Amino acid sequence: MRGRKSGAQPVDGRCRNKPDACDHPVDIGTDAGSAGQALHDAGSAVTTAERTNASQDEISRMSQEGTDSSVARFFGDRLLQWYRREKRDLPWRRSRDPYHIWVSEIMLQQTRVETVIPYFERFMAQFPTVAELAAAPEADVLKAWEGLGYYSRARNLQAAARQVVERHGGVVPSDRADVFALKGVGPYTAGAILSIAFNQPEPAVDGNVMRVLSRFFNLDLDIARPATREVLEQLARSLIPAGAASDFNQALMELGALVCTPRSPGCLTCPVMARCAGRLAGRERELPVKSKAKPPKPVHRLAVLIASGDSVLAGRVLVRQRPAEGLLARMWELPHVEAPNKSIWSDEVAASSWLIGALAAEGLKVNPIRPIAEAEHVFTHLHWFVKLWSAVPADNRQSGGLPSNYRWIDAREFEQLAWPNVFRKLLGDYFGR
């Protein structure tokens, strides 16, 4: 998954897909002559809409700046010297193993570095090779991923591992087309794998990179637009120093993570401060340009905590597994339904009646008692507001007659199954009482 409450997913200080909250590497450089050509060519990629922010005069101005080879040499030399002196000791940087780099890049999407480190170390201990990841039960992979959010990343990673086993004998390919063909691997991740693991001059343009380049070149391009990413990929590719793609891309990510941060750039400690056009223009805090994203849609949900009163099932709670496709596929959760509006969600009489009818429609008969907790969960496009009710079964058939995706679990089973954060928090509070 970017203060969020009860199980909401953290958003990275380096979030790749959230350019204003990022913390990851980038690549730039051969000579500034090619940089200038890239900027000139990039002009054709900027649509009429983008030119409301970037005129043809600006594209020409960028091209002229890029043709000065001293700019590229200055940028690359200073950045590499700084990185080799200041880089953080991160577990995925301790080898050039493409599998390690690949897993780390997937985990780091929308997630902070400090959050990822323990997950990465546990994941690699459990699935030390591509083949072992490919052969693992999906439930084990999801459990290892639990808490990182954005679970399609884990499913795609395992599906891609199976592709590597089937097509490449378990060896992560170094061919550009083969890497791009892996499930869940887009331009950024492919560029990161190819450049960091294999030192190939491929750009890896994430939010950090777009922010650094926008400031250094004083660009008015809206980084929320796909056309801007294309422009900056061309620029980044042209700037990658010969033979130093791996360190350079990581250096650019590190600069965005540690110095050229979204809201408080540390210009006085920046290795390329002297020739940063954005700083010289006094615009370092207003760049990059980024149009506001549409806020996630609020969704009000009513959930039930049904603890068994049956002597055989004492201490157990009723849960269900989500469908095999769609949001949070195949993960476990408390039974819950969407309220038609906030008014019903907020009114106890109306909410109780709605819960009874909606759950009965899927074969579960319950008697809600009272609301006992509230929680929130933020997705990219949805914002769940969850109100948890205590409830009891409406009949005595507690062990039988349940829908096929329902089961009773105890505290031990709770720890074995994979849960979305919001339900892990609610159930963890219950079992930990």
Image: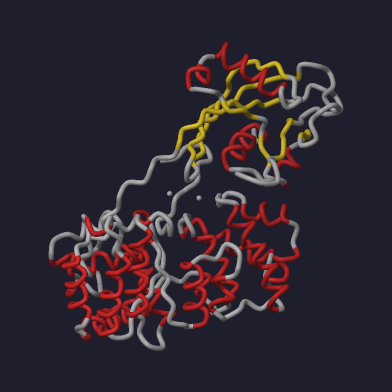
Which residue reaches farthest bottom?
243
In the shown orientation, is residue 180 left or right of residue 14?
right
> How many badges with numbers are in the image?
0
In the depicted view, which residue is nearer to us: 3 or 66? Answer: 66
| Quadrant where the image shows the C terminus | top right
In the shown orientation, is residue 107 left or right of residue 220?
right
Q: Position of residue 8 (x, y in %)?
A: 50, 41
373 to 3, vertically: above or below: above
Q: Position of residue 359 (x, y in %)?
A: 69, 24
397 to 54, vertically: above or below: above
Which residue reaches farthest left?
281
Rendered image coloring scheme: secondary structure
In the depicted view, which residue is nearer to us: 384 or 256? Answer: 384
What residue is shown at x 41% (from left), y 79% (from top)?
247
Q: Position of residue 176 (x, y in %)?
A: 53, 78
In the shown orientation, is residue 425 left or right of residue 32?
right
In the shown orientation, is residue 366 left or right of residue 102?
right
Q: Position of residue 401 (x, y in %)?
A: 84, 26
What residue is shown at x 75% (from left), y 24% (from top)?
364
Residue 365, quarter of the rendered image: top right
Residue 24, quarter of the rendered image: bottom left
What residue is shown at x 39% (from left), y 40% (from top)?
295
267 to 235, vertically: above or below: above
